[in-house]
Image (tube, helix red, strand yellow):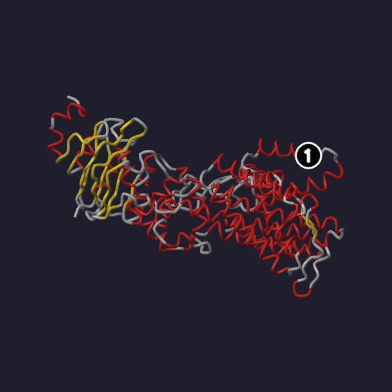
């Protein structure tokens, strides 16, 4: 059974067709890279998969279960987590609280109006573990407002990882990072265990190609080429629309 | 540690002072003003749940406040007991809050504000024009205050103590709410609703429940109001009251515990005390608000804390080197 299946997914904004009959199938444990020029509809595809947008037609399956009509927030409970291209964190809170909120989202305690969140150690301990994985445990109590861009990128990833997802969608995790930071994030992504299926949008070819096993090339909302790393890189259409000569 | 102890001492001192008010100011007029500050503070705390922590600015809270007061008043006029009147009043305000929430939570920001404003004005219209039910402009009179456990609340001091107890319960419930997981969820939906949804939170339901909690405490304040005045009229349900409640929250400091209380104190003192000396007291109130917004845009309480730190932080001769481990860096969420 595939971890994630997208079948003939379509989405238009008015007259603009942003996703046109996209089908793809990602196997459990796979590392899939989605590439394409700006405006190819990569993030829209993510938004359709996570349910933040409703498709006009087509279906999305998570481990064989049709989730096309499942509310976006329920998909998190079913094992889907994502990061955002534009950093979407809680600026008034500490790093630790950001990750704790990610854990709380899947915990029934989120409705608890009486307990003290700081005293829910099963959450804060797990948040600390997630921060250790991304190398931020030493600044866990720092307010997010006082962190660097590279650290925030890693908080994004820590929040998604903390939820123990089965399918992890990474939207340009290397965007705006320095070479050193890129290497750190790259090591962090490689360390993600194989029981997590990873789908990643990325422009940064040197790090992304190394990470991906299969690649899907989108162009004007449609899948142009799909295959293994070498197949896609050597495909003439890839050179034409994306990589250039 | 020292800061924590200082804070505990300050709170203990404030509590003692609050309990001594009727003994200290013998004049019943000022005891009554103290009662007014306390129940308006409860109303402002209620609105602060929505406007501060949930980021949903409501201009219809006078409606929720008034529904509780009117329901209780009309139940008493119909011959029911105080207990039934109070329960019915609270039920009515929570129910009205639920209706408000279902309609207004279709949107956020300005849309939310306009819908709550319209709904509040509908309630004002009912209070004003549906004279068969609400006695219209004549309002509803209450013959007496309740006497729990045989203690009469007719005297200003005894009513003050009841109001104080209710006020302290409200403050306590806010303290618990703010640090609870649910409180964190509410603030999360204010700061990043999209992310909250992706993390598995039901953003709509969280906001709905926050609205109910806000409606409940607005109802409590409305009941204190109607028992204090032993009278309620359409005027109190009007937009003016909603706007005043919002001014209390904003001037004191949104999303802070003590801000709305300070804001309520300013407005009530301006209305009652300054108006005795200055005819154009509204002008004074306006100038004060402009000054607060200009010099402390975050509100009086957080603004004062900032100025205090600025003034006294400098006097420290040496600062310990910034460490990367906790402690040094306090979270930004204002709890003052």
Whether residue B3 is visible: yes
Give how far across and how far down residue B16 sits, in percent: 73, 63
Residue at the top extreme of this rendering: A245
Task: Left or right? Give the position of A28 relative to B249.
Answer: left
Image quadrant where residue B88 sits? bottom right
In-image side of B180 versus B66 (left or right): left
Give left or right: position of B176 versus A140: right
Which residue in the structure is indicated by mark 1? B282
Local packing at callout 1 (Cα closer than 10 Å; few below 14, some 14-19, many 20+) is some
Q: How many marks?
A: 1
Q: Residue at 42% of width from left, 59% of height from top?
A: A124
Which residue is at 75% across, 60% downward? B17
> Where does the image place residue B162, in percent across and percent down from the top left?
74, 65
Nearest to the observer: residue A168 or residue A148: A168
* Subunit of label 1: B
- Foreground of the two, B5 or B292: B292
Residue in the foreground of this view, choosing between B98 and B125: B125
Residue B28 at x, y percent in the picture = 86, 59
> In the picture shown, does residue B49 fall above or below B74?
above
Q: Is residue B312 visible?
A: no
Q: Secondary structure at mark 1?
A: helix
Q: Single out the residue that lies furthest toward the bottom.
A: B149
Is the residue B284 above or below the residue A160 in the image?
above
Residue at the image position 39 percent from the left and 58 percent from the top: A106
Classify residue B300 by image quadrant.
Answer: top right
Q: Which image quadrant: the N terminus of chain B? A: bottom right
């Amino acid at each position: 059974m595939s971890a994630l299946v997208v079948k003939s997914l379509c989405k238009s904004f008015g007259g603009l067709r942003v996703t046109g009959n996209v089908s793809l199938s990602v196997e459990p444990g796979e590392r899939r890279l989605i590439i394409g020029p700006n405006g190819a509809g990569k993030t829209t595809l993510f938004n359709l998969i996570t349910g933040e947008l409703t498709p006009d037609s087509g279906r999305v399956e998570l481990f064989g279960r049709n989730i096309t009509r499942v509310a976006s927030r329920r998909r998190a409970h079913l094992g889907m987590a994502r990061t955002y291209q534009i950093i979407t964190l809680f600026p008034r809170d500490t790093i630790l609280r950001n990750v704790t909120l990610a854990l709380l989202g899947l915990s029934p305690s989120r409705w608890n109006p009486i307990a003290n969140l700081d005293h829910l150690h099963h959450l804060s301990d797990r948040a600390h573990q997630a921060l250790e994985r991304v190398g931020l445990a030493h600044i866990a109590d720092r307010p997010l407002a006082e962190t660097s861009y590279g650290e925030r990128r890693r908080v994004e990833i820590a929040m998604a990882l903390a939820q123990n997802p089965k399918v992890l969608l990474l939207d340009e995790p290397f965007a705006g990072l320095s070479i050193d930071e890129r290497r750190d994030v790259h090591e962090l992504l490689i360390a993600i265990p194989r029981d997590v299926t990873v789908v990643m949008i990325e422009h940064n070819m040197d790090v992304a190609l190394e990470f991906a096993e299969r690649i899907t090339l989108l162009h004007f909302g449609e899948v142009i080429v799909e295959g293994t790393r070498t197949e896609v890189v050597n495909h003439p259409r890839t050179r034409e629309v994306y990589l250039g000569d | 540690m020292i800061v924590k102890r200082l804070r505990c001492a300050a709170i203990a001192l404030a509590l003692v002072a609050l309990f001594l008010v009727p003994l200290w100011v013998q004049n019943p007029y000022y005891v009554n003003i103290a009662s007014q500050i306390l129940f308006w503070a409860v109303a402002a705390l209620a609105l602060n749940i929505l406007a501060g922590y949930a980021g949903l600015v409501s201009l219809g809270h006078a409606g929720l406040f008034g529904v509780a007061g009117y329901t209780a008043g009309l139940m008493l006029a119909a011959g029911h007991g105080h207990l039934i009147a109070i329960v019915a009043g609270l039920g009515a305000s929570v129910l009205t809050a639920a209706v408000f929430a279902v309609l207004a939570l279709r949107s956020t920001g300005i849309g939310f504000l306009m819908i709550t404003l319209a709904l509040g004005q509908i309630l004002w219209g009912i209070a004003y024009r549906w004279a068969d039910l609400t006695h219209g402009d004549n309002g509803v009179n209450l013959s007496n205050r309740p006497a729990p456990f045989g203690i009469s609340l007719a005297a200003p001091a005894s009513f003050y103590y009841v109001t104080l107890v209710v006020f302290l319960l409200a403050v306590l419930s806010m303290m618990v709410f703010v640090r609870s997981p649910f409180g964190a969820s509410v603030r999360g939906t204010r700061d990043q609703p999209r992310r909250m949804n992706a993390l598995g939170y039901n953003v709509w339901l969280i906001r709905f429940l926050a609205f109910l909690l806000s409606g409940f405490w607005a109802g409590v304040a409305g009941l204190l109001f109607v028992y204090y005045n032993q009278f309620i009229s359409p005027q109190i349900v009007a937009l003016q009251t909603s706007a005043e409640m919002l001014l209390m929250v904003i001037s004191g400091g949104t999303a802070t515990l003590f801000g709305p209380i300070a804001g309520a104190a300013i407005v009530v003192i301006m209305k009652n005390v300054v108006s005795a000396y200055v005819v154009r007291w509204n002008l004074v109130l306006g100038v004060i608000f402009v000054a607060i917004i200009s010099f402390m845009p975050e509100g009086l309480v957080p603004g004062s804390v900032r100025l205090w730190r600025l003034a006294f932080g400098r006097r420290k001769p040496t600062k310990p080197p910034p460490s990367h481990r906790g402690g040094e860096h306090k979270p930004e969420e204002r709890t003052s």
